[in-house]
Structure formats: structure tokens, C-alpha cells
Amino acid sequence: MNSFLVIIVLVLLSIAIWQLTKIFDLTQVGKSSDDSQVANDTDNKVNGYLMFAFLIFIYLTTIFCIVEYGHFPMMDNSASEHGKDLDQLMWISMLLIFVVQTITQALLHYFAFKYRGRKGQTALYFADNNRLEFIWSSIPAIVLAVLIFYGLYAWTDIMFVDEKDNNTMVVELYAKQFGWEARYSGSDNVLGKANVRYIEGVNTVGVDLADPNAQDDIVVNELHLPKGKRVLFKIRSQDVLHSAYMPHFRAQMNCVPGMVTQFSFIPTVTTTEMRESDDMIEKVSNINAIRQKKSLKLIAEGKTGLDPYTFDYLLLCNKICGASHYNMQMKIVIDTPQEFKTWLKDKPTLVQAVKTSNATPEATEETKGTKDTTIVKKDSTTVAQVEIKK
């Protein structure tokens, strides 16, 4: 409500100023020998100085944004190996934009003043200048070529991965409205075949349980990854177009129904290490200060206050995929290699989970009655008869 009142006041103030300028114009009638609407030398000179004033405004605004927002968190503190290259490329691009913007804006406003309209002055016209055209064409071309090759180098390092490398772990990310599931490839490091037609019961990602490679696959709802190990993500979508977005790892890839996309990175900062970093401690402190103020307001209204914020890596969806798009997030935990092994050790395979869900006690005794009854449910799950490597 307060914001609305402020907007109303600003609008009324603008109308009042506009009316005052009209009144001022009327008071000047007859005082000038030139009452035409064509700009004269004085008008052009004033506009030239206003251009300089606007240039100063642009520079002051730029300096303010650098000081106030220069610590924007997604420009540093990357948690993946390639993230440093990506951040560096972003900083180079921003620096180039800043330098070019500073120079071109200064020249634009200077020439607007220097060559302002004057009575009797005519413009010099020439058809072309090969030297100037060569300079202003070659410099941007060279700079853009360097940036493109730098980006291609980083992209190639990310996308071209040897799946047979022992230091590469294959993990599937499965997107659906509105949530995520992850599937680990197990000891053989090969994901079993999958299709939406196989989705049934606890087999929510549609794994073909008859595929030998699927016997050691593990499906989870919280993604754990070991620090220092390359992870190759195979990404699928069950329904619509999603986008797997992991901002702190500088990773994003579309999830397309009917096809498998992929992305890889090497985590370099554990969740604990990120939480204990100075920048993150400051950020969490600022967030909790805001949440505390909000909680006090909610409690005063008889509502439940907000819980304190704790940092976690997140997998998000970066596509507007439906009404509950905002709910599509999954917690990511970066562990040390030993912590990851301990966490994964006790996780049942999908085959075991399916068998457990289908199994029932072999016999149940009726407590009321003289006759025992046996209820047996047949396990109809088809699985491959293979030896699981330990």
C-alpha cells in the first residue's frame, strides 16, 4: 500500500512540474525575438551541456553498481573445476564491456556537444574511409574470436568425456513435473536401460529391470557427489521440457522428453567447506537477519515464523515447466570420497527396492478363528540373473 501511495505522489508531482513548465513558457511570450519551434544556437548549446550531465550520471551509476553489487555471488565462489574458467570468461567479458562502454559513451556525448547545431554550419560528408572501416571491423572481430575460442575450449573440456575412465562416475538426473530423482550407475558404472513404459510402483524412473546393467542401479531423492571426481550426468525428462540447473557448479542442460542429454563437472568444494567459507557465512547471516525480521512480523500476526536458513547446494529447474515449477529442486550434498562411499554403501538397489515392495510375509496367522490362512503374493518382477560385483 505504501508503495502505491509513493507512485501516486510521484505521478502527481510529475504533472505539477509539467504544468509549471507550461506556465513558464507562457510568461516568456513576447520576450524573445525568436518565437519559432526551431532550435537555435542557445538551445543546442544547452542540450550539449545536458549531454555531458547525462554522461556524468551514467558514470556515477556505473560506479555505484560496481561498489554496491560488485560482490554478486554468482561471479565467484564456484564449486566446480570448470567454474573458475567460466567465471574468468565472465569477468573478461564484463571488463571489455565496461571499457568499451566508457570510451564509446564519452566519445558519443563529446561529439554530440562539439558538433552541435550552429547557424550557418554545414556537415562534412564523405562516402567512405577504408582505414576507419578496417579498424572498427577488425578489432571487434579479433576480440570476439578470442572470447569464442576461450569458450569453446571450456565447453569441449566439459562435454567430451571418456565414460570408460575409472575416475568418471555416471549418474542419471530424471526430471518430471514437479521433482527430481537421481540414479547411480552402481559398481559397473553403466546405467541400465530405461523407458517411461516401465514406470510402475517404486520403479518411478522406468528402469528396465531385465537389463543386466540395471541390477546395481540405485535411485535416490537426494543427490550426493564425491569431491574431486568427475561426474557425467545423463539427463532425461518424463513429460515436458525441463532444465537441470546447478548454479554453484556453473552447470545447466536442457532435459528433453524422448532423448538423453548430458553434462559433466568435477566438484571441488564440499558442502561443509562452502558453509564455512567467509563469503557464505556473511551471506547466510544477511539472509537470516532478513528472515528474522519477517518472522517477527509473522509471529505478531499469529502465524508461524520462518526457520533459520542453512546453505545447501541445489538442483533447480530453469524452465517454466508448469504451475509448480518453483517446487522443482533437489538437495545436492558434496562429500569427501570416504563420506560418499559410506553414504552410498547402505543404499538398496532399485531391484532390491522393487522386490521388497512386492514381497509379503509368507504366512500370516489369524488371531480370531480356528483355521490358519496363508496369503502369498507372487513376485512378478522380471530381473536379469547376473552376478553383482561387490
Image (cartoon, rainbow, N blue to C red):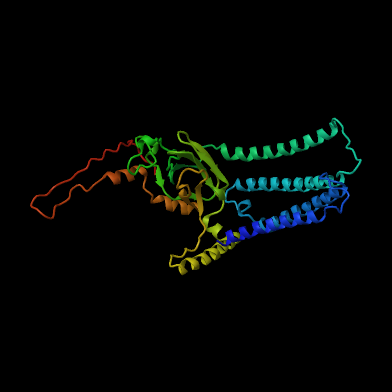
Q: Viewer-proximal residue, 339 or 328? A: 328
**Residue 57 in the image, given as x and y percentages of width and height:** 75, 54
Report if residue 164 is visible in the image: no
Residue drawn at the location 71% of the way across and 36% of the way down: 145
Instruction: Find the residue positioned furthest to the left.
Output: 370
Q: Residue 21: which quarter of the image?
A: bottom right
Q: Viewer-proximal residue, 130 or 209? A: 130
Instruction: Find the residue positioned furthest to the right.
Output: 120
**Residue 48 in the image, given as x and y percentages of width and height:** 83, 49
Q: Viewer-proximal residue, 206 or 290? A: 290
Report if residue 18 is visible in the image: yes
Side (left or right) of 256 relative to 132 = left
Residue drawn at the location 91% of the way across and 40% of the way down: 121
**Residue 369 in the image, given as x and y percentages of width and height:** 9, 53
Side (left or right) of 383 relative to 51 = left
Image quadrant holding the C terminus, namely top left
